[in-house]
Amino acid sequence: MAGRRPPPVASIGHSGCGEARRCYADGLAGQHADAEREIVTAIDLFRSVGDVCSVVTSLDQLIREQQTMGRYEAAEVSVREARDVSATHGLRGWHATMTTRLASLIRLGDPNGAAELHHAALDVGRELALPDVEATALDGLGLVWRRCGDLDEARRCHEASRLVSSRFRTARGVARSAIQLGYVAEETGDALAAVRYHDEALAIARDRSDERGVASAIEGLASAAAGDDAELAAMLLWHAAHLRGSGATPLWDDDRLDVERTERAVRAQLGDRYDAALEAGRAHQLDELLERVGASSHAH
């Protein structure tokens, strides 16, 4: 056997894995165009040898890269392909995962369609005991309800999602639900609860060295602070933008709504002073600003 060349299928599969690894590394480094090119090559290689599971997992990575670059129409095409492949080959768990992903992409333009997809994924997640699918679908439904103005139903969905993630010790899921519960609390006028939820998400993200999660929690805290201290909110937004400026943690489409709402509220209060207040964040340590958020929320 020594010295024998591997069979063509194994060789092609090995090449596909190499491209996928390079994609992952380039994505972490913020080289998203290179990462996209590499994962597309991997998909073509896996498809040529009929490796369905690798095709779907690689499409999942492609979708992330496309969303990161703001190419949401391309991401939707990739999601639909991954969903179709999963359905054709009986990969029900992956089909449910891609169903939640598709729902998140159409949620802004078609909330009713997104809700139907989230419900479908939720049913499969519960049937197959897939906690991440179940929790993601519940958070997706909560977002739909909040965007439609039903904060009570939104809270119930996010609390249910948080419970699932807590039960299965999925820290990322707990943080995701906490951020959404923070926004719900803020919109119901409970600033103290909003800060508490965003603080929880921040602690989890820092513990996991998750820059995207840290940025999201800071944006939530900025939103919670905006009503009482617009300058503090602006400085927090600077820190979040600085984190996202790395290229590895950009805002995705659905997340952008809450951040833009916060920016509008802060601009409305500060007027011409907004840019100076934003830039002032550079001169302050993040932890100093976070202490001020906590002090302000407890004062009220």
Image: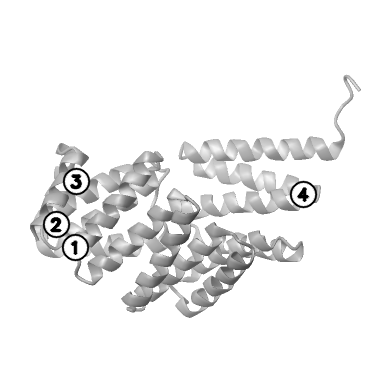
Secondary element under disc 2, as helix, strand or loop, is: helix
Q: With respect to residue 88, does 284 lie above or below?
A: above
Percent x, y of residue 227: 14, 63
In the shown orientation, is residue 286 left or right of residue 12?
A: left
Q: Amino acid at mark 1?
A: Ala
Res. 297 mark: 2
Q: Residue at x 53, y 44 (%)?
A: 33
State left or right for residue 186 relative to residue 136.
Answer: left
Tell me the residue that label 4 is attached to.
51
Label 4 CA crowd tier, 10 Å (few <14, some 14–19, many 20+): some
CB contact under 8 Å: marks 3 and 2? no
Q: Residue furthest front?
A: 167
* One can see residue 45 in this view: yes
Q: Which quadrant is the N terminus positioned in?
A: top right
Q: Earlier in the sequence, mark 3 or mark 2?
A: 3
- Image point 45% across, 76% down: which residue? 111
Q: Earlier in the sequence, mark 2 or mark 4?
A: 4
**Element marked by disc 3:** helix
Q: Which mark is residue 191?
A: 1
Q: Residues within 10 Å of mark 1 (few under 14, many from 20)?
A: many
Q: Is residue 250 left or right of residue 103?
A: left
Task: Name the residue beneath numbered marker 3.
Answer: 290
Question: CA gap, disc 3 to disc 2?
Answer: 11 Å
Cα–Cα span, label 1 and label 4: 50 Å
